[in-house]
Image (cartoon, grey):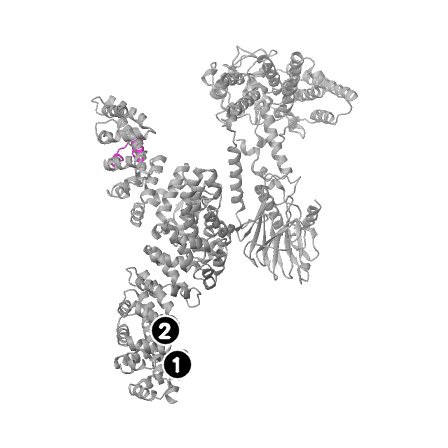
Amino acid sequence: MDAMAELGAGSLLLGDPAFNYQEAELNERLKRLYPAVNEDETPLPRSWSPKDKYSYIGLSQNNLRVHYKGHGKNHKDAASVRATHPIPAACGIYYFEVKIVSKGLDFLSSLLPLSPIPGWDKHSYGYHGDDGHSFCSSGTGQPYGPTFTTGDVIGCCVNLINNTCFYTKNGISLGVAFTDLPPNLYPTVGLQTPGEIVDANFGQQPFVFDIEDYMSEWRAKIHGMIARFPIGERLGEWQAVLQNMVSTYLVHHGYCATATAFARATETLIQEDQTSIKNRQRIQKLVLAGRVGEAIEATQQLYPGLLEHNPNLLFMLKCRQFVEMVNGTDSEVRCFSIRSPKSQDSYPGSPSLSPRHGATNPNLHSAGADSPTCSNGVTPPNKNKSHNKYPGVSSASSSSSSSPSSVNYSESNSTDSTKSQPHSGTSNQEETSDSEMEIEAEHYTNGVAENPSARIMNGTYKHQEILQAQDISLEDSCASRQLCGGNQAATERMIQFGRELQGLNEQLCREYGKNVTHKKMLQDAFSLLAYSDPWNCPVGQQLDPMQRENICSALNSAILESQNLPKQPPLMLALGQATECVQLMARVRSGSCSFARVDNFLH
Amino acid sequence: MQEVTATSRHYVDRLFHPDPQKVLQGVIDMKNAVIGNNKQKANLIVLGAVPRLLYLLQQGLSSSELRTECVVVLGSLAMGTENNIKSLVDCHIIPALLQGLVCPDLVFIEACLRCLRTVFISPVTPVQLLYTDPTVIPHLMSLLSRSPRTQDYITQIFSHCCKSPEHQTVLFNHGAIQNIAPMLISLSYKVRMQALKCFSVLAYENTQVSMTLVNVLVDGDLLSQVFVRMLQRNLPIEMQLTAAKCLTYMCRAGAIRTDDRCIVLKTLPCLVRMCSKERLLEERVEGAETLAYLMEPDVELQRIASVTDHLVAMLADYFKYPSSVSAITDIKRLDHDLKHAHELRQAAFKLYASLGSNDEDIRKKITETENMMDRIVSGLSESSIKVRLAAVRCLHSLSRSVQQLRTSFHDHAVWKPLMKLLQNAPDEVLVMASSTLCNLLLEFSPSKEPILESGVVELLCSLTQSDSPALRVNGIWALMNMAFQADQKVKGEIVRALGTEQLFRLLSDPDTNVLMKTLGLLRNLLSTRPHIDQIMSSHGKQIMQAVTLILEGEHSIEVKEQTLCILANIADGNTAKELIMTNDDILQKIKYYMGHSNAKLQLAATFCISNLIWNEEGSCQERQDKLRELGFVDILHKLTQALDPNLCERAKTAMQHYLA
């Protein structure tokens, strides 16, 4: 990073629009070429290092131009400079070019740790322009390619997948020069004659050689390798594993009906019993609907002791409850309110229980079940009562339009039992928590027939249903949002609740010591009250229904854990492991990781 | 067997049922019975199912469903052995199916096309059958827009039936390019691929097609750009290779420059990749052959290819089949290797020949490749004619190098297998081999001596009697090289073996090259005074006759110049001189050419006179007087004022002899 700081000396030039433009182009190109590289961990070479160079070397033009300023009498006068950083393994395939602006008597270009002449020292490799020989850790060269001279563009490609390297001359590949390369190579250039000048291109400009084409071949190769991974005799075993993964995933998220149908079709068993699944599902729905108070209550009822043993979780839930009170959605405040502020209920964007894909999900890792991915692949059977009509629920079909991965919220809640909804009249009312066809019935009536947009919004109308919006007038859905639904009594209840929450925090501090996260959470939640329009304030983000997802899945995991069930579905575990594995590959310098990204396989 | 025939019989019988519904069911049952069953197919054909099916197919009363099912069964029969195809073609299935294409029913058309495709892609079907009816091609063109299936089948038919420049022209004239070009961006990979293949066949060695292709736009892109996109490395190899072929053919036809980026940076590297070990053997063969063809005329491409991805070394691997490992471990693999071994070797030789045809450094690199000369030597005597031809082409290409002639060629005694090859080989091999021999007989070649001793003269003389002009040229050329600065014995042998009659026949050869080399031979024979006098004393009369004839005939400047040079050589002899001095006709001709408008001819004629007046012994006075009488001095005088410095110099020297 020191070297980067040095490069930052170019800050003088920051005002230069041309430079900024080039910088932007460089960033864009590097990102495109090496998407798997995490530059916080392993920065890419972007210029020659003014520190790691011989004194005979002069740098100019943002440390991209190298010229020789020594005597150049013999090999002892040779000098070299290396790039600011070694080549990260996560590049998979790395490439840079050097243009010979002016040739002295002879020219040497190479890769690797600083050495008097690249290629002559231990662990250094090079391709020399005077004789076209390649040098590998010694002073004697092997015939390799043509000679090169002024005007030629020489490129060097390091393949970190098979640890080889080849050079290019004016866009033509000269073939493999070295095999079994060690890790952590630096782009290096060496000169030894006065008058020699070379310009580097680490991605500042388009390359003469079509490196992206070369990369595409390797990407295809590695994808082919993964796709054709031999499973041989274990075909049946694999199928069972895959079915189990799908099934456990469905169960985990409480897609009870789908899970049952899937289990029936694949003749597998579901570990957890139906009631338990439905209980969890109910609790999750409450949280996602913003009715956290009820969720807590239900949890305490169904899983006594659970929250007591998880004070952190309880605190988080209570914080969320406070936020929902501000929102006007929690039942503790809603019961005061005549008008239900529907606008908050609507749940735009991502559906609650229907997790998003990896691409939009940056914090996916093996340890956290908080944001599950890949669920759109699960298609609930689109039908009413008879599940048999659709025996094979494919886990692969994932078209966004055709797979209604929507979650079913139709189940009614014990506390809000008024069900008839004028605008969703056909909703499924006869069954509550153990309805098998709830999803489908909802889907057809509300989602498709009456309110097509609901299908995309995945759940909007369902919230309305759960919340039993007394006020069903559609026209005021955009009505101004008010604190606690604008009800005075509700606001007082909220303030009181806030005090209780404060008290809980203090109690926790006494018992378990200070907790920075809690403090921050509390602060953020209380800050909402400081603004006249909490929805449009710096901390207003908290009011977004999307924020319910994390706490919802945390609660779900805790319940599962308390039942001695895995707190994370194996599918997510596998996905997390795969992602982690690819990252690990980068760290242990296995270059193929760059072409085996998990994202590429999530469609 | 009896039983099988009995069931087959039953199937055929059902085709004759009076109830059309029963017939339809019979055809459907037959369809299910023949799928994948070659024996059943053969039985049905023997039992005469084909004519009945064709009858039902053409019968106007048949339902379109029945007609379609009939075609499907026929298509299934065609999928069998080559004998099946022959039987079907003999039953005139092709006209019947082509006739069916007029029907408006798309399903039926597709079935007909599928069956036609299967029949036409078979090597036993005469492709001419597609062109017999002139309405067929235009109709097929019009069907191209009907569906992706019709596109797929029709382009396959075109690709397999386009075997000659005439076929290319027919398809071209019926708008093949405009009709097929949009298919290159079809959503179906199959269709894109077949369209591409079709273009590669159409463009091969066809300037007209290539020149048209280069200006075609597909969805706003030039066709060459579309082809370049198909070279992308992540695409299937088949597509990359075929796209590279299209670009290669367009380049060879002059439609794309050889220094165009799409050739240098895309097509050439792609073809080099096709030669790599990772590719299938078939792909490597095609890749190498196409690459050889691409760079044959262009030294810059040869230079680039020679440094791309270690191509020269990569090709050495082509000779390692069947590999020793495969022989032991895997019989199937061995079989596969053996099948392709010849193809691989000849492809490698071709590519080496192309690589080394111009650049001395590349030739050196090739000969330094592991065991290269040994491989060529053994290639020259391989059983496969293709390999022998390619090996001798390679040798020929390398024989253009003075250095190689002096070193590796001599070290490996390549002349031995070469001589053997010349004994008994088809013309195309002979042309290459004799051309190579010409180079080996060059004066500085150390192989010249042993070749002479091996009795090559007879062989070369027999070549001069060949019907092929190329062989006559090579024969006489080799003799010419052989006679250059040769001793009396060799020259005598050449004259004796060739015979004056044949020599004079060659002097009236319709091929200018042959004439030129024969004159060259004469000139080489007539060098150094004793040789001149000796040959002229025995063959003087005929030679003077021939010379007169050529000088009087309609010939190019080069031929006349060469003839005048022969005269100059004759004039250099001691006794031979008199043959000119006593021939007033010749002297008049020399005089004429001294005043010719072409300086080269003037120079050669002056050379001749200069030799005649050469003042060495006492006898020159007489000649000088005669020449003065004939007015040569005046002409020489004029020529001393000539603009051409050589001519002027020569005239001055001649004048000095007079004064001396």
Q: What stretch is highlighted in magenta?
A: B98-113
**Predominant secondary structure, magenta span:** helix
Magenta highlight on residue B109: yes
- Pointers 1 and 2 within a single chain: yes
Marked residue nearer the N-terminal end (1 or 2): 2
B219 sits to left or right of A295: left
In terms of secondary structure, where does tag 2 sit? helix
B243 sits to left or right of A260: left
Magenta highlight on residue B560: no
Q: Mark 1 points at which residue?
A: B650
A139 sits to left or right of A242: right
Residue B63: percent from left, percent from top: 25, 26
* Closer to us: B605 or B171: B605
Determine contact: label 1, label 2, CB under 8 Å. no
Q: Which amino acid does label 1 sit on?
A: Arg
Q: Which amino acid does label 2 sit on?
A: Gln
Residue B607: percent from left, percent from top: 36, 79
Q: Mark 2 points at which residue?
A: B488
Q: Residues within 10 Å of mark 2 (few under 14, many from 20)?
A: some
Residue B595: percent from left, percent from top: 32, 79
